Amino acid sequence: MTTGHLDADVLATLRDIMGEDQFPVLVETYLSDSERRLAGLLAATEARALRDAAHSFKGSSSNMGAMRLAELCGRLEHLPLEAPAQAVAELRSGIEQEFTAVRARFLAILDRSPPA
């Protein structure tokens, strides 16, 4: 069940698979990796690099239950090459905002900050 920014069913499955000791490590790895992926996505100036960054970020986010983030990345990945710059900019901004929300939720899960 997706509520807000993370799918609770995916998170429960990941906790079961990873165990309570390793689940935080998985989340920390995802967050660290995602910050690099987001930076690459925001910095990409060529269509192929942008699509590759969006595709990679989509997959990791989907695996972690960040379904809205994955969906936004998928939309960016599949934009036509001739898409207006404004459409690309809006999706990049949406992805950045959604990752900020996802990051806050994961940090709350790790008990590092209150939920937003």
Image (cartoon, rainbow, N blue to C red):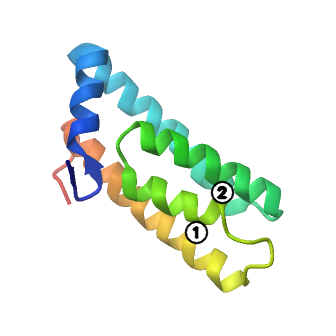
| Residue 109 relative to residue 50: left or right | left
97 left or right of 34?
A: left
At x 47%, y 53%, the residue is 70
Q: Is residue 75 above or below residue 36?
A: below
Residue 74, percent from left and from top? 56, 58
Seen from the viewer's position, the closer of residues 76 and 20 is: 76
User: Marks 2 and 1: CB-CB under 8 Å?
Assistant: yes
What amino acid is found at the position of numbered circle 1 in the picture?
Answer: Arg
Task: From the image, tell me which residue sits under label 1.
Answer: 92
User: Residue 72, position in %: x, y?
Assistant: 50, 63
Q: Residue at position x 46%, y 44% from top?
A: 61
Total numbered circles: 2
Q: Secondary structure at mark 2?
A: helix
The vertical placement of 29 against 71, above or below, is: above
Residue type marked 2? Leu
Which numbered tag is attached to residue 66?
none
Query: In the depicted view, which residue is nearer to us: 61 or 102?
Result: 61
Residue drawn at point x = 33 percent, y = 59 percent: 101
Distance between mark 2 and mark 1 Cα atoms: 8 Å
Residue placed at 53% from the left, 42% from the top? Answer: 59
Q: Is residue 26 above or below residue 41?
A: above
Q: Which residue is mark 2?
A: 41
Local crowd size for mark 1, using a 10 Å CA cut-off: few (<14), some (14–19), many (≥20) = many
Please provide percent x and percent y for residue 35: 53, 47
**Quick one: SS at disc 1?**
helix
Residue 104 x %, y %? 30, 52
Q: Is residue 78 left or right of residue 2?
A: right
